[in-house]
Amino acid sequence: MYESSSELAENKLLMLYVLKSIKEPISNTQLTEIILENNFINYFTFQQYLSELEESRFVEYNDVNDKKLIILTEKGDNVLSLFKDRLSPSKISIIDAYIKDKIEAIKKELTIHADYTLGSNDSFIVDLKAIEDQALLMELKLSVPSKNQATLICNKWKENPSDIYTNIINLLIN
């Protein structure tokens, strides 16, 4: 019993450590990916722990630009500070290396949004957003005649948002 309760505590602390290390609110999907890709916890156990951390008010969900993002609360940060020494150094180094390697992709996923919905007259409404420091930089909504075009626009926006943003700004200014 002692082993499993110490493992449970370490896994929850590890989740808090990830949130603190990223220093940004992240989605449930992103946090899940970080934990699962490193084979720390299985999916169902992870979701249970996340729910328990939320119930304990160590983490909370905030609505940021139409997304529910997880943040580490002050209470969670205090608990992590008190018990961080219970985390194995090898897991900490794995998390640190993973975050260092993937932080740009994680931030890009949080700051670039591209989606489409079915509009009227069988058209598709494409919604593109660029967000910086949790503030909306640009939002563009387009109506296109086909799903293929909507998908193409979303993919191009995700691949190269800064160039497209710069081109749009230049077109409007010049």
Image (tube, rainbow, N blue to C red):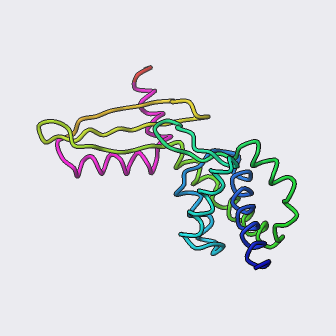
Quarter of the figure with the N terminus = bottom right
- Horizontally, residue 140 falls left or right of residue 130, namely left
Asked if the stretch drawn in magenta spans residue 150, the answer is: yes
Most extreme residue toward the left, as rendered? Answer: 121
Most extreme residue toward the front, as rendered? Answer: 1
Quarter of the figure with the C terminus = top left
- Horizontally, residue 119 falls left or right of residue 138, namely left
Give me the residue at 26% from left, 38% from top.
Answer: 125
Give me the residue at 55% from left, 51% from top.
Answer: 27
Asked if residue 135 is positioned above or below residue 59 in the image, the reply reads: above
Give me the residue at 69% from left, 60% from top.
Answer: 15
- Horizontally, residue 38 falls left or right of residue 168, namely right
Asked if the stretch drawn in magenta spans residue 163, the answer is: yes
Q: Position of residue 166 (x, y in %)?
A: 48, 33
Q: Please, what is the dominant secondary structure of the magenta stretch?
A: helix
Asked if residue 162 is positioned above or below residue 174 in the image, the reply reads: below
| Corner quadrant of residue 74 | top right
- Between 132 and 25, the residue placed more toward the observer is 25
Q: Position of residue 137 (x, y in %)?
A: 51, 30
Q: Position of residue 34 (x, y in %)?
A: 61, 63
Give me the residue at 46% from left, 47% from top.
Answer: 160
- Horizontally, residue 122 falls left or right of residue 55, namely left
Task: Give the magenta range.
Answer: 145-171
Q: Position of residue 59 (x, y in %)?
A: 66, 48
| Corner quadrant of residue 88 | bottom right
- Between 170 and 113, the residue placed more toward the observer is 113
- Between 42 and 96, the residue placed more toward the observer is 42
Asked if residue 114 is positioned above or below residue 3 in the image, the reply reads: above
Total numbered labels placed on residues in the image:
0
